[in-house]
Amino acid sequence: MPLVRVDMIKGKSPEYKKDLLECIHEGLVESIGIEDWDRFQRIVEIDREDFDTAPGKTDNFMIIEITMFPGRTKEQKKALIETITGKLAERLSVAATDVFIVINEPADENWGMAGKQRG
């Protein structure tokens, strides 16, 4: 049950945002084997003047935070990062230098779903 949050500069079309989320979801399915129905994604759009980035980043720059249950291997996480970045480049022409991915893995006891603690 990965939770995905994308912080990006405001102004992209609804089609672009839909494709963006699809690229991320496909990367999750292909690299770590989540079920196709398992979609918990959100985009947070930020005005350009409120989004401070390193020099050289374009208006396509995005931070993708993926929070998921612990237990994936280093190789699976590497594949996830590379797959998402590749799909964004191929389908949306986002340069790899404009993709920043962070994977968070809170311990099972830090998850609560349907009123119950996991683990």
Image (cartoon, grey):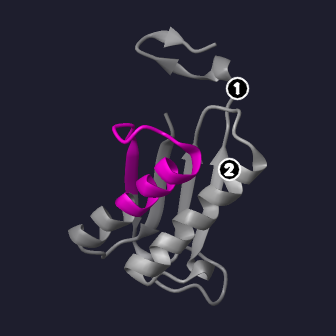
Tag 1 secondary structure: loop
Residue 20 position (above or below residue 94): above
In the rendered structure, does residue 15 fall within the stretch colored magenta?
A: no
Residue 73 on image: x %, y %: 74, 43
**Circle 1 is placed at which residue position?**
107
Residue 98 on image: x %, y %: 57, 78
Quarter of the figure with residue 71: top right
* Sequence-wise first label, 1 or 2: 2
Residue drawn at the location 56% of the way across and 48% of the way down = 66
Q: Amino acid at mark 2?
A: Gln
Residue drawn at the location 54% of the way across and 73% of the way down = 86
Q: Which residues are magenta?
A: 22-43
Q: Does residue 96 appear left or right of residue 46 in this picture?
A: right
Q: Which mark is residue 76?
A: 2
Q: Are marks 1 and 2 in contact (CB under 8 Å)?
A: no
Residue 49 on image: x %, y %: 46, 78
Residue drawn at the location 39% of the way across and 37% of the way down = 38
Q: Amino acid at mark 1?
A: Ala
Residue at mark 1 to residue at mark 2: CA–CA distance: 18 Å
Q: Does residue 72 appear left or right of residue 9 in this picture?
A: right
